[in-house]
């Protein structure tokens, strides 16, 4: 073979270790007593490769040229299974918007198999939008270009920001049209179909355990826990060679810790997941399922990008830590039958707010360029910061980058001028708003003086914690609009820019600018639905 894909060595630990649904018909159904169902991706008429992430090619041990071969697009649009692949969809449940939703499962995601990567790790390849599975319920198993561009770009953007995430290898058009009612208002329209190939060590979610507990499948619950520990948490396996309840409790504590850290990372970069249902919570603590997510523009902890969430705002920016905690409670409930003792689970849940707080403080100290977070002064400093950021519409990404540029000993007017690009309504910078900003800056400068870090060193630290480039909501939408016209240039440009989100990249500075006014309330820019 010369298509380069023969370099992919499959080693399907997941399907080999866990029980399959004996039924191999691709019909929608409830699946019990199994973790997954074998299923073949749908064939598409005219696959066309839109974009590839070269770092993910490399991760898998593929040459960049491999993506130019026809076999690549055929494979990653779902038209062709490679030798060694073992395609399947998995069964999970979940709590959606706080309510138990029963069986969900991979309704439009098909795992192709696990690749032994050059770094020695196994990584699962997964096609999203590759056609119906037994878990598709009433939907079509497909995905559209709009949501696939968003998933592809944001997966890679998050990785380059240093935030744990599933990766995206490729974005492919299927050449088929898919019907979607984007705003759920009765105006369905045809949109281009697309497939993203996602890559992660595991796509296990809290919901995989919840469905087993809900069905009383205790033996299978234990088996999945044992598998997860052996495959993905070697430290726990080593510390608990006999496995069992102590290992499960330790797993829970580790998942709680990773989740706390993950959410603190989202808060650091201004990411709002938008649908933190328990089926969208990764057991590995990865960001997973990029749907109606959004990036904070002006600092507003009450903002949710998801129109389906507009009423309750459960998934608003500022509520993400609390929702993570609630989701962990659901995971604890699910694995309790295997642990058999509530105490260690309760202890880990009780510790979560402090764990999260510790992560958040570390991130805030980095964002502000402080040696460390000193509660005696910095609780008031960060409270004051957030009050100030809300006192007038302030672009939070621009604000922190500009703040890094201020010298500890500079004049108040110079400091103020340095921040001017961050304000959406500069005319509001008068009276008490202006006094508030001045007051906070003075406090901040006093705090910097107390630390005594040289300005250049502090600036470098801050610029490593505060990205200059994030996938601003309107930028993703512009790339989607152009792609709809057959122009993929902006997708490639954004991918390139977001590879180095902490670098200045002067030629691309326009993409670090404030959200333009036209995007303030445009669908796709500030309002997104789950339709995808
Ligand atoms: P999400 O809100 O995207 O996390 O999806 C929730 C559930 O709905 C998951 O089980 C998905 O697999 C399923 N789902 C979402 N969109 C589709 C679709 N177009 N076809 C089949 N299943 C879907
Ligand atoms: Mg999901």
Image: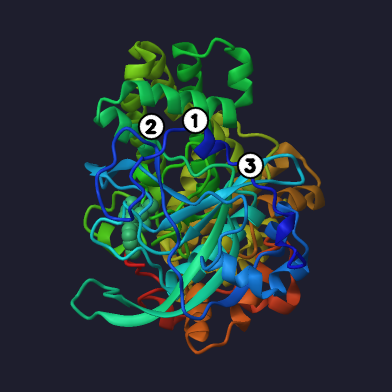
Residue at position x 36%, y 21% in the image: 219
Q: CA distance from mark 3 to mark 1?
A: 25 Å
Observer-nearest of 122 and 450: 122
Circles 2 and 1: CB atoms closer than 8 Å:
yes
Badge 3 element: loop
Binning the other alpha carbons within 10 Å of mark 2 as few (below 14), some (14 to 19) or many (20 upward) gives many
Q: Is residue 204 above or below residue 232?
A: below
| Residue that mark 1 sits on | 255
Residue at position x 18%, y 77% in the image: 186
Badge 1 element: helix
Q: CA distance from mark 2 to mark 3?
A: 31 Å
* Marks 3, 1: nearer the viewer: 3
Judged left or right of residue 29, residue 521 is right
Residue 298 showing in the rendered view: yes
- Mark before the other along the chain sequence, 3 or 1: 3
Residue at the far bottom: name it: 485
Q: Is residue 277 above or below residue 399?
A: above
| Residue that mark 2 sits on | 328
**Residue 260's x, y, as percent?**
49, 35
| Residue that mark 3 sits on | 11
Q: CA distance from mark 2 to mark 1?
A: 8 Å
Residue at the far left: name it: 186
């Amino acid at each position: 073979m010369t298509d380069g894909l023969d370099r992919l060595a499959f080693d399907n630990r997941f399907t080999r270790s866990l029980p399959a649904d004996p039924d191999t018909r691709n019909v929608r159904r409830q699946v019990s007593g199994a973790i997954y169902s074998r299923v073949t991706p749908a064939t598409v008429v005219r696959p066309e490769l839109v974009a590839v992430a070269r770092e993910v090619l490399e991760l898998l041990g593929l040459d960049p040229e491999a993506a130019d071969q026809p076999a690549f697009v055929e494979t990653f649009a779902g038209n062709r299974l490679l030798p060694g692949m073992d395609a399947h969809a998995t069964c999970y449940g979940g709590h959606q918007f706080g309510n138990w939703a029963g069986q969900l499962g991979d309704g439009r995601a098909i795992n192709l198999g696990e690749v032994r990567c050059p770094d020695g790790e196994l990584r699962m390849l997964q096609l999203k939008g590759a056609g119906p599975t037994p878990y598709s319920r009433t939907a079509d198993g497909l995905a559209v270009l709009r949501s696939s561009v968003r998933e592809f770009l944001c997966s890679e953007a998050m990785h380059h920001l240093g935030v744990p995430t599933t990766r995206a290898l490729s974005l492919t058009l299927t050449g088929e049209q898919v019907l979607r009612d984007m705003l759920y208002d009765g105006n369905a329209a045809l949109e281009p179909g697309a497939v993203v190939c996602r890559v992660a060590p595991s796509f296990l979610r809290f919901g995989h355990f919840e469905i087993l507990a809900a069905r009383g499948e205790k033996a299978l619950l234990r088996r999945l826990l044992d598998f997860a520990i052996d495959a993905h948490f070697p430290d726990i396996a080593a510390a608990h060679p006999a496995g069992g309840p102590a290992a499960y409790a330790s797993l829970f504590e580790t998942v709680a810790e990773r989740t706390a850290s993950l959410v603190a990372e989202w808060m650091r970069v201004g990411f709002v997941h938008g649908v933190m249902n328990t089926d969208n919570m990764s057991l590995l603590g990865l960001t997973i399922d990029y749907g109606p997510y959004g990036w904070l523009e002006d600092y507003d902890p009450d903002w949710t990008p998801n129109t389906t969430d507009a009423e309750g705002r459960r998934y608003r920016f500022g509520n993400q830590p609390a929702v993570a905690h609630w989701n962990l409670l659901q995971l604890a409930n699910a694995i309790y039958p295997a642990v058999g003792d509530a105490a260690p689970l309760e202890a880990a849940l009780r510790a979560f707010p402090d764990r999260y707080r510790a992560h958040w403080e570390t991130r805030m100290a980095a964002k502000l360029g402080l040696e460390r977070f000193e509660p005696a002064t910095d609780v008031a400093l960060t409270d004051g910061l957030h009050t100030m950021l809300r006192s007038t519409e302030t672009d939070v990404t621009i604000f922190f980058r500009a703040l890094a540029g201020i010298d500890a000993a500079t004049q108040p007017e110079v400091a103020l001028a340095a921040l001017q690009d961050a304000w959406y309504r500069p005319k509001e910078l008068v009276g008490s708003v202006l006094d508030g900003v001045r007051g906070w800056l003075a406090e901040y400068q006093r705090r910097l003086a107390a630390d005594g870090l040289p300005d250049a060193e502090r600036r470098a630290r801050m610029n490593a914690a505060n990205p200059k480039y994030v996938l601003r909501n309107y930028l993703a939408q512009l790339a989607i609009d152009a792609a709809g016209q057959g122009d993929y240039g902006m997708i490639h440009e954004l991918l390139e820019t977001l590879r180095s989100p902490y670098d200045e990249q002067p030629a691309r500075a326009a993409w670090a600018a404030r959200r333009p006014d036209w995007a303030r309330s445009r669908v796709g820019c500030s309002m997104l639905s789950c339709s995808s």
